[in-house]
Image (tube, rainbow, N blue to C red):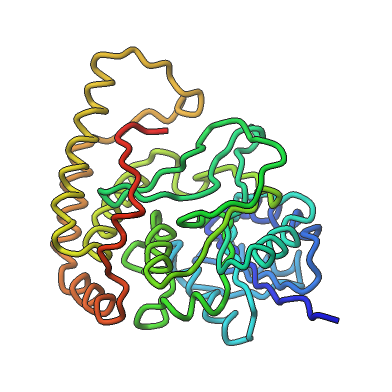
Amino acid sequence: MKKEPSVAIIVLNWNGFEDTQECFNSLRQAGCANYTVILVDNGSENNEGGRLKELFPEIHLIQNAANRGFAGGNNDGIRWALLQGFDYIVNLNNDCIVEKDWLSRLVAGVQAAGADFASSLITYYPETDLVCSDENVLLPDGSGLVVNHCRPVQPGGCIRPVFSASGAASLYSAACLEAVKLPDNQFFDELYFAYLEDLDLGIRLSAKGFKGVCIPGAVVYHKESRASGYRSGFHIFHLEKNRLLNELLNYPLWLIPLGELFYCIKTLVNISRKLFLKKEKNPRDVGHEKKYHPLSVIIDSRLWVLGNIPAIRRDRKNRKMRGLITGRVISHFRWRVLPS
């Protein structure tokens, strides 16, 4: 009888006790017997990590003294899981609720497809009939795009290839993570801290020829941006900073100016649309109007890059030596200037 693969599910918590508790309750019906939940508490207040461990004694707790972000916190969990010999690593946001048999469907799907990593079908919560994320695609300027974002969920979808899995509910084989890890055992690059680090990982996996799929039967409901705040200054700053990092760390030098030209065109098109078209407001944007000046975000993100040039150069040099920077990345670009 074939042995069931072992799975480590990594869940980060940062002052999100109630969301994490609801997530853990849903995981008890994940439908896979051979799995372990790893809680990485990123320096939460009120001993949230310890309290969650008391409620869910079956989990493994990693207690960090400070907030290490999505990248650093997940790296802590991945390192522990690989030392224990797990076959697959799952990253699951704490503000997610999984459907019954989600994990068994995810594992069965990636094995049936002969793939190395996979993305769940992530819908919004409570609007569970709308797609939140099912795949990340790469734009020429280093930003990401969810093609089916906010579109109705199509029942009975087939397993299909994807470029990059969404970090909110993704699965990776231990072998593919080991193949593209960075110095200091970084699987998600910790320069990113939060946002687009899943897309960066997807670019590295693509450079080494690993295969990704979306498993539409593995459904997760996502409350989205509970920790950082939807469209907050923190959110927008890291999206812009990490967009630049995706170019600087993953593109051949000749491709970076093309990416920035695309960024300028995309920005001008979207400004023009706002000025000349009366666009109906997205209901999800109500109450989340911008409280920052876009120009200040652009300036701050570039100042951050200038202040971290030595670390960026070291990172890029390592990637180049290992064949992780390739002009073939252009074949994966989606030349789309309008948001979904």
User: Total number of numbered labels?
Assistant: 0
Residue 145 percent across, percent down from the top left = 40, 44
| Nearest the eye: 276 or 190 | 276
Q: Residue at x 24, y 35 (%)?
A: 266
Using the image, determine if residue 255 lies above or below residue 124. below
Q: In which quarter of the image is the C terminus?
A: top left
| Nearest the eye: 305 or 267 | 267
Image side of residue 213 versus residue 204, left or right: right
Q: Which residue is drawn at 61% across and 30% down?
A: 152
Q: Which residue is drawn at 34% across and 82% down?
A: 183
Q: Quadrant of residue 262?
A: top left
Does any portion of residue 188 appear in the rendered image? yes
- In this view, which residue lies farthest toward the right? 1
Image side of residue 299 versus residue 130, left or right: left
Residue 220 percent across, percent down from the top left = 66, 48
Q: Quadrant of residue 305?
A: bottom left
Does any portion of residue 47 appear in the rendered image? no
